[in-house]
Image (cartoon, helix red, strand yellow):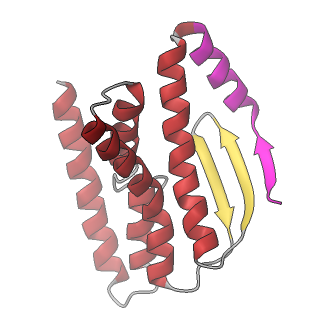
Amino acid sequence: MPEIRIKFSFIVFNALIFLFRESEMISGFYIACILHEFGHAAAVYASGGKINRIELSCFGIKITASQPESLISGIIILLSGPAANLLTYFLLKISGADGYLAVYSLAEGIFNLLPYSFLDGGAVLELIAEGSPHERILHKFYFILKAASAAIILNLFI
């Protein structure tokens, strides 16, 4: 059984959500988050790994698992969370369900693919660069990718 840590910031975050949002929106958000983490967990166990710790904070859920057997296995584990969200979104769209769960699944799937190290997409990039003979060049490229994605996101809000 993995160790479960719940930080105070997680409790505060949840209290604020329950104060200011409607229940259908909240349930869609939490189901999308749970599906995302189940995607990761399923990939960890399918690859023969073990989940050691689950930490909940206002920044999200962090799963600490045993070291993957290979680079490919690590990439699959990291991408399985966003894949679970995107699969959920497409299945809901095909079935005609356009509720909060579909919207949050799409948003969480895309958001977690962004190239920032605290997200799944960035963790994949770090995993690929780590130990590579071209590690310095890859880190420079990743920096440019991060800056470009930040500019695109900022442009979408303006």
Report the predominant secondary structure element of the magenta stretch: helix
Q: Is residue 130 above or below residue 10?
A: below
Q: Position of residue 118 (x, y in %)?
A: 49, 53
Taking the spot 38% from the left edge, 59% from the top edge, the residue there is: 121
- Work out which quarter of the rendered image holds the C terminus and state it: top left
Q: Position of residue 34 (x, y in %)?
A: 57, 43
Q: In the image, 82: left or right of 69?
A: left
Q: In the image, 40: left or right of 96?
A: right
Q: In the image, 84: left or right of 153?
A: right
The quadrant holding residue 19 is top right
Taking the spot 39% from the left edge, 45% from the top edge, the residue there is: 88
User: Is 63 inside the magenta-drawn segment?
Assistant: no
Number of numbered discs visible in the structure rendering: 0
Q: Position of residue 82 (x, y in %)?
A: 41, 53
Taking the spot 29% from the left edge, 45% from the top edge, the residue there is: 90
The part of the chain drawn in magenta is: 1-19
The residue lying toward the viewer, choosing from 146 and 104, is: 104
The quadrant holding residue 45 is bottom right
The residue lying toward the viewer, choosing from 15 and 140, is: 15
